[in-house]
Image (cartoon, rainbow, N blue to C red):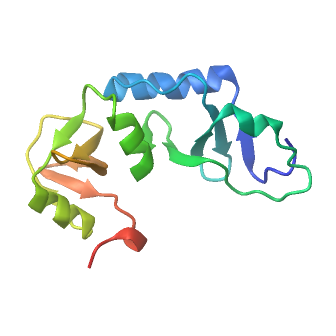
């Protein structure tokens, strides 16, 4: 699959490591048929369906492919918004339900004043939606919502 600039198709051992991080942190499982790519410059993980392997990429210069799942860190995995939504569908732990007013503040880029015993990356949800990921620092949930997507 040459033509995939800075993208590496992950081998089953590397995929297993990511799946294990997701399972340990959120108790969630991802579809077994997904193909995983890693942007080697930024440690960003992308997923796509297996049919992508049938495309010949030699004539293309591709920086990203598929859905941005999240960032692979030294000992953690930090989901993107879409990654949190995908993981959050089956997550059984490290999911925190917040009020609609708190969700609005989060979507505006504000940290949330909230006490929780949860550690590590936390998926934030309302009764209706999964809105993203945060991490607890003291009694605050830090905001990771991208500036380009924030509400005024």
Quadrant placement of the N terminus: top right
Image spot of residue 84 (x, y percent): 37, 43
Instruction: Name the foreground residue: 21 vs 56.
Output: 56
Q: Residue at x 24, y 33 (%)?
A: 94
Q: Is residue 109 left or right of residue 38?
A: left
Q: Residue at x 26, y 79 (%)?
A: 152
Do we see residue 70 in this rendering? yes
Instruction: Name the foreground residue: 30 vs 110.
Output: 30
81 to 18, vertically: above or below? below
Residue occupying the far right of the picture = 59
Do we see residue 111 in this rendering? no
76 to 41, vertically: above or below? above
Image spot of residue 141 (x, y percent): 20, 52
Residue occupying the far bottom of the picture = 152
1 to 13, vertically: above or below? below
Q: Is residue 1 left or right of residue 31?
A: right
Image spot of residue 117 (x, y percent): 13, 34
Q: Is residue 141 left or right of residue 55?
A: left
Count of numbered labels shown in the rendering? 0
Q: Residue at x 85, y 48 (%)?
A: 57
Image spot of residue 149 (x, y percent): 38, 69
Image quarter of residue 8: top right
Image quarter of residue 89: top left
Q: Residue at x 85, y 51 (%)?
A: 3
């Amino acid at each position: 699959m040459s033509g995939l600039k800075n993208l590496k198709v992950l081998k089953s051992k590397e995929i297993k490591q990511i799946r294990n991080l997701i399972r340990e942190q959120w108790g969630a499982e991802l579809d077994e048929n997904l193909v995983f790519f890693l942007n080697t410059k930024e440690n960003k993980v992308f997923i796509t369906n297996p049919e992508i392997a049938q495309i010949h990429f030699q004539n293309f210069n591709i920086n990203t492919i598929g859905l941005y799942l999240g960032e692979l860190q030294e000992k953690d995995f930090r989901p993107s918004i879409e990654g949190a939504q995908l993981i959050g569908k089956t997550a059984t732990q490290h999911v925190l339900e917040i009020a609609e007013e708190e969700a609005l503040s989060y979507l505006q880029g504000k940290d949330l004043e909230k006490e929780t015993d949860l550690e590590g990356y936390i998926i934030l949800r309302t009764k209706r939606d999964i809105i993203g990921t945060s991490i607890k620092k003291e009694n605050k949930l830090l905001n990771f919502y991208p500036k380009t997507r924030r509400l005024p």
